[in-house]
Amino acid sequence: MIRASRILLLAASALASGTTPVRAQSRVELTLAATTDVHGRLRAWDYYADRPDPDRGLTRAATIVDSLRRAAPGRVILVDAGDLLQGNPMTYVAARIDSTRPSPVVAAMNVMRYDAAAVGNHEFNYGLPTFDRARTGATFPFLAANTRRLDGGTPFPARTMVTRAGVKIAIIGVTTPGSMVWDRDHLRGRLEVTDIVAALPPQITAARAEGADLVVVVAHAGLGGESSYDTVGTGLASENPMARVAREVRGIDVLVIGHSHREVADSTIAGVLVMQPRNWATSVAAATIALEREGTGWKVVSRRGRLVPARGHAEQPAVVQAVARAHQSAVKHANEVIGRTDVAWRTDSARVRDEPLIDLIQAAQLRATGAQLSIASAFTLDARLEPGPITVRQIAQLYPYENSLRALRLSGAQLHAFLEHSARYWIVEADGAGGFRTRPDPTIPGYNYDILAGAEYVVDLSRPMGSRIATLTYKGRPIADADTFTVAVNNYRAGGAGGYAMLRGAPVVYESPTEIRDLVIAEVRRRGVLKPEEIGERNYRLLPPRRTVRVLAINDFHGALTKRPVGTIGNRGGVAELATMIREAGAACAPTCVPLVLHGGDMFQGTAASNLAFGRTVVPILEALGVAAGALGNHEFDWGQDTLRARMRELKPLILGSNVRDPDGGDIDWIPDDTLVARDGVRIGIIGLADPATPRTTMPRYVANLRFLPPALYVRERAAALRARGADAVVVVAHIGGFCEIAAPDQCRGEIIELAKELPAGFVDAIVSGHTHSAINTVVNGIPVVQARSNGQALGVIDITLGGGAPQRPELRAVVSDSVRRDPAVAALVAEAEAAVASRIAAPVTTAEVRFARAGDQYPLGNLIADAQRAAGRGDLAVMNNGGIRTEIRQGVVTWGDLFEVQPFGNRLVAVTIRGDALRRYLEALVDGRGIRYHLSGVTIEYDPSAPSGSRLRSVRFDDGRSLENGRRYRIVMTDFLATGGDGAALTRDARIEDLNRVDLDALIQHLQGLPGGRPTLTPALQAPRIKPIP
């Protein structure tokens, strides 16, 4: 009897201590229970609606935990994954109004006998002192292995060890590094939050060394996805790395995660069980973990998880009692009357249209800061004001966070970037019936969709992400990138949170610790009676998605199949890389857009792989790029009309030239004027134009029977005809160029700019330009104009919204070759084309000690080529046109293929003999005021650029010191292109022309190999300009 009593006493003692005596057994099952992101939802009460909440509450979760403990006595572990101390009027009163009393959250958790909690980012919202005061009353630890105190305060422990049924369980806590952005003001200089992934391995190793049989990581971080802050710019680790932790960090048995407000019931990643209960104590995660004896310890043999909803469970009386006083205080505070209104207010549409309740927040922020503009979010779509009294709880629902207020100085460029980032919130999808539907991106929290007040703007969802802001004005004036404004914004956003990196580091011109919610409450008190018409200001619109055309433009490809270095900026171009960019650019604007690939001419002539096949190798590549049509370039004629016509027959995309006529002004039957193409039900008219100067920029004999006329008349005629045939949009492809200032892209000049100015409004929707190898991305006369440099170095992008809308500035995207994956199908075509000429291309010719650049009007490379031609023809002088020098000579080994690209046209050299007076007139033509487009050898001339055309020449001196004599005959070496009037400088009719039976490229190679050492160097003679302007 005594022995039996002793056993009963031991059992009672064990129950009181929370454990049960166990005999030596080989198997045990434990239950791990978890909550997360409770955010003060202790009672089953909705403080915003002032009524019971049937779906959630820690008091309901406590009942679930009690039932788990009854089912598994002495074998339950209870944890929370953070974000406990902030989130509703209960926590606000505890932190701001009644802060000297013990935290009601901690009191509730003590009653429930939590074993541990991870530190959540919202634990820091009221500052470290408030958090420290709250946790001092906890009977459980707040864990954060990846934190370090800098202020001398009590550090957060990394882990704790508990024992259940003889099993030692290590609980390790970690928290997201994002707190360093979101609560920077509270943490800077006081606490550091580091990388979760790096912090866990040493803690797991230490726990195992201490005898842990089971390792549970409780993480206030989500599984994955893009961080809401810029990890590169901030230097912070990922916000949500827990899937990576499960895959990469060894020794974890169970992961309990939070922060992302999602549910994960029973997921296994790399053998690790992952659970996440629903936020706001809406559910409890419960894992059953079976372990078997292994030596002196235990081994996990199975684990499974489930979620138990709070709905349907009664509130646990002990927890209700523990938070009763705090609940009463919260209800009283929440129901305090601060104003009134006579009408109903809603936020249910606040993310799709301008709503007065959001303007109320903006008004409070503008009043406090005196800023010009204000940024705010619709944190919830459930906030409302009914006619009658306005209470604190209604404003707390409208603004539930403890954000403070700042004002930043932002540029117009930052404002544009900010609004574009915000507009990413909307996803546009095809609805299956020919239209579109719009929905929020589920990966972007609604509170990261911001609204700007004080400026007027339009968000056009027809446009692709990154270019959705159709207009942005301030007091009726368009906002320029260089403009500056003061902008009110909360501290969370001011730090760049939510991915708004453009705001981080902006100058702060106002800062206050007062919470914005209190400012809004004060704004209501000040007004007394809220009237929407006094607060609401319709300053932005959200346009629904409509069908668009995305023009993807290339020009002056010149057979450049592979990437090549461009100066000192690295590799650019490559058609396989360009193909990838075209495909990705077309996909990026889906589903609203119809991609249309166009070219601006000069696609064939320029490299050995193309030229040695007379452009045939380029044909399948243009088709693989998806080109729909293109312009007729001057270099398309370089092999004569028969070869051009053969290429046009082989090529499915049409080459267009509406302004090319016969001598009588009639149409050329083999050169189409335009075409009408259909894409996904959209009809696009395309008009082609050739350069009116083509007879001067190609071999004149090849176009002698053609006339290249001013283009404006033909554009007007063809555009009207295409519209009559049902074209939804009309695009011009023109081998006509221009130039724009790099620092001022709208300061442009040239023939294509003048053409755009001549066209009537609405005739043309876009222009794809070519010929001048320049960067153009501007809007002229309401028409977007683009030219994408040359050689596939860039891709032009124009988005056209059908049915009207402001024209968008075109975009130029550099083809940064080494950063783009090659399209395998196009790469195979390139390999085939290059294999046919590989041995010839790769043959070394010389070595360049330095780079011979092609820049400006006069440069050493041009002088070098002119010297080579004079030497080949033994002339008194030589003339080389700049247009015949197609690229630079790069430093290092120079191959035959490299030199071929410098002089790809295969022009024959001739010697022209003329009298001195004719030579003087010819040299006058070289400086006639249209810019210096030539290089000379054997002679140096000086001219006065301010003198009238035809009388600018001031001196002519040959290298041997002679002056020009009118009656003497001189031998000039040049290409047959120049000798027959190419480039516009014509010789006299009595000039004698001798064919030297040499090609320009061969003369250059022979000259280079005959230089001292067989290598070109930058001698003073090469560097000195030979056509010199004088003051």
Image (cartoon, rainbow, N blue to C red):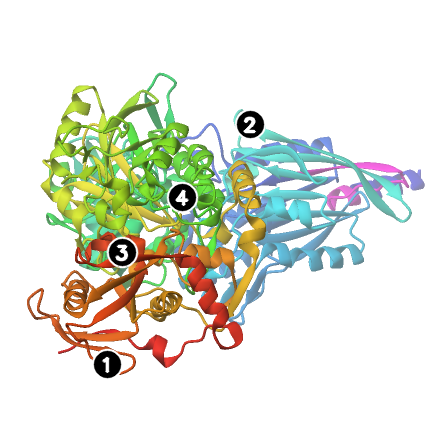
The reply to whether dot 4 and dot 1 touch (C-beta < 8 Å) is no
Residue corresponding to mark 2: 313
Residue corresponding to mark 3: 978
Q: Tell me if mark 3 has few (under 14), some (14-19) or many (20+) residues whose alpha carbon lies within 10 angstroms of its own.
A: many
Q: Is residue 135 left or right of residue 726?
A: right
Q: Tell me if mark 1 has few (under 14), some (14-19) or many (20+) residues whose alpha carbon lies within 10 angstroms of its own.
A: few
Residue corresponding to mark 1: 962
Q: CA distance from mark 4 to mark 1?
A: 95 Å
Say which quarter of the image contains residue 20: top right
Between disc 4 and disc 1, whose residue precedes?
4
The reply to whether dot 3 and dot 1 touch (C-beta < 8 Å) is no
Residue corresponding to mark 4: 88
Residue pictured at 40% horizontal, 47% vertical: 792
Camera-near label (4 vs 3) is 3
Camera-near label (4 vs 1) is 1
Camera-near label (2 vs 1) is 1
Judge by depth and name the residue closer to the eye, 844 or 731: 844
Q: Secondary structure at mark 1?
A: loop
Region rendered in magenta = 13-32
Between disc 3 and disc 1, whose residue precedes?
1
Q: Tell me if mark 2 has few (under 14), some (14-19) or many (20+) residues whose alpha carbon lies within 10 angstroms of its own.
A: some
